[in-house]
Structures are given as structure tokens and as C-alpha cells.
Amino acid sequence: LSVLIAAGADVNARNVDGSSAVDQATDDKCVEILVQAGATVAEVKEIDGWNLKPGDSVVGKYRNGSWYNACVDSVQDEGYVLLWDDGDTEDTFKTKSELGIYLSSMKSDVRQAVVGAQVRGNYDGNSTWYDATVAEVRDDGVIVIDWDDGDTQHKERTAEQIFVILSNVTEA
């Protein structure tokens, strides 16, 4: 995204399907970057399935082993180039095993398909994330998870408290 803008890309240009870059963006930071470059704002869309595209909001595993928010800048043959939300420009190329999508970014029908998937769940509402498996996605939006370490507390999570690692799911 930043490379295209720096190269003079028309941020208000329309794709063949009539959508714009802002229409494709799923992350507030990506929308902010586009707006700063002169794009007009449209409704932010949810991620559709597992095939990421530029502007999609993701969680990337940084070289220190921690997971950080980012958006997809470009799609490559073997992975994705990210724009870190904090502006860091290092360690930006990621494979599917180093990328996650918050369940809150997924369309509800795709969210139902993650039952049984290995995920990372926010345990304490702060910054503590642990491995878990999705046990149930309820109609009220609550996701029930089983912590890999066997802990029985904090099993009911919101979609904002869970992300699925792309390499742990089968593409629909």
C-alpha cells in the first residue's frame, strides 16, 4: 500500500468490479493511510475467506515471537508483505504460519468454519495470548475455546479476543 502510494498510485481509482482501495481496506490504520493520501472514505468491509488482499487487517508474528497488528501491503507468491500498525518497517514479509486474522474481522459464515481450529486467545483482556482450540461459535457471538494448557477459566471469549493462524485452517 505505502509503496503504491509513494509511486503515485491513484488512491481513488476503481477496480474492474467497481471497488476502490478504501472499499477493500479492512483495518482503520490502512484506511487512515489511504485517506492521508487523498482517498475518499467508504464502508470498511470484512475479510471474506482466507485469501488475503492488500488492506486486510491481520496479526503478524514478529521476529521476537510476539504478535502485532498490521495490514497486508502486498501479496507475494510465498507470503505477504505487511505494514505494521506501529510504523516499524523491519521484518515485514510473512508466511501463512506467521499471520493471523481476528475472528471479529471475518464474515459470520466464515467464523462458523473455525470450530476445531487452532487459535491464539487473549486470556486476561490485556496482552496475554495463549494457544487454544475453538470448541463452539455461539449465535450470540460468544466463542468458546479450550485452552491448550488445560486451564478452565476464561473460556468464553469475544471475536476480538481470538485470532486464527492462517496455516491452521483449510481454505474454503
Image (cartoon, helix red, strand yellow):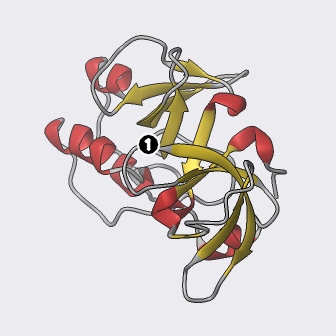
The front one of 21 and 108 is 108
Q: In the rendered view, tell whether residue 132 sits above or below residue 86.
A: below
Q: Quadrant of the N terminus?
A: top left
Q: In the rendered view, tell whether residue 89 sits above or below residue 43.
A: above
The front one of 39 and 104 is 104
Tell me which amino acid carries mark 1.
Answer: Gly
Q: Is residue 164 left or right of residue 102?
A: right
Determine the residue located farthest toward the bottom in the rendered image: 139
> Residue 91, how many percent across, how many down?
48, 13
> Residue 18, how many percent across, how many down?
45, 59
> Residue 11, how many percent across, how many down?
29, 40
* SS type, badge 1: loop
> Residue 9, how many percent across, how many down?
32, 29
Residue depicted at 60% across the width and 42% down the height: 100
Q: Quadrant of the C terminus?
A: bottom right
Q: Is residue 68 left or right of residue 167?
A: left
Q: In the rendered view, tell whether residue 138 sits above or below residue 61.
A: below
Q: Which residue is mark 1?
A: 55
Residue depicted at 67% across the width and 65% down the height: 152
Can residue 17 be seen here? The reply is: no
Can residue 24 be seen here? The reply is: yes
Residue depicted at 27% across the width and 19% down the height: 6
Residue 44 in which image quadrant: bottom left
Q: In the rendered view, tell whether residue 76 sits above or below residue 52.
A: above
